[in-house]
Image (cartoon, rainbow, N blue to C red):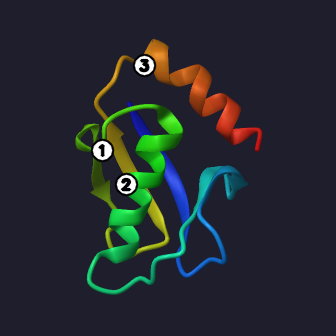
Amino acid sequence: MRIDIFATPNASRTKVGGVHEGKLKVRVVAVPEQGRANHAIILALAKALGVRKSQVLLVGGATNRRKTFEISEDEAVLTPVVDRLLRG
């Protein structure tokens, strides 16, 4: 399953949830230097979705706030979780 997110690095706290520009909002404390924010987003997404971090792969937008991730999990399992996160 692919998930489009809107990333906010250097936030006051890490949080996954809500919608920005039609994408799942992910805020992380990490700074956007040397891939630190991307790594923090992977960890936050994995925890929020209930999957291993190895199941979360960044497939687009490595240097952009708009990113696309591929989650290696059954879509029927992930869809209700993603819907809940989008509601905030």
Under circle 2, the secondary element is helix
Q: Amino acid at mark 1?
A: Lys
Name the residue at the right extreme.
Answer: 87
Residue 3 is left or right of residue 69, and the answer is right
- The local secondary structure at tag 1 comes to helix
Q: Which mark is residue 82?
A: none
Q: Position of residue 8 (x, y in %)?
A: 58, 72
CA gap, disc 2 and disc 1: 6 Å
| Nearest to viewer (mark 2 / mark 3) | 2
Q: Are marks 2 and 1 in contact (CB under 8 Å)?
A: yes
User: What is the x, y in percent for residue 25?
Assistant: 62, 56
- The residue carrying mark 3 is 75
Left-right relation of 54 to 8:
left
Is residue 60 among what the camera can see? yes
Q: Amino acid at mark 3?
A: Glu
- Decide which of 17, 2 is in the foreground and name it: 17
| On screen, residue 3 above or below 34 | above
Tell me the residue that label 2 is attached to.
42
Residue displayed at 76% across by 38% down: 87
Q: Quadrant of the N terminus?
A: top left
Q: Which residue is mark 1?
A: 53
Q: Earlier in the sequence, mark 2 or mark 3?
A: 2
Q: Residue at x 53, y 41 (%)?
A: 48
Identify the amino acid type marked 2: Ile
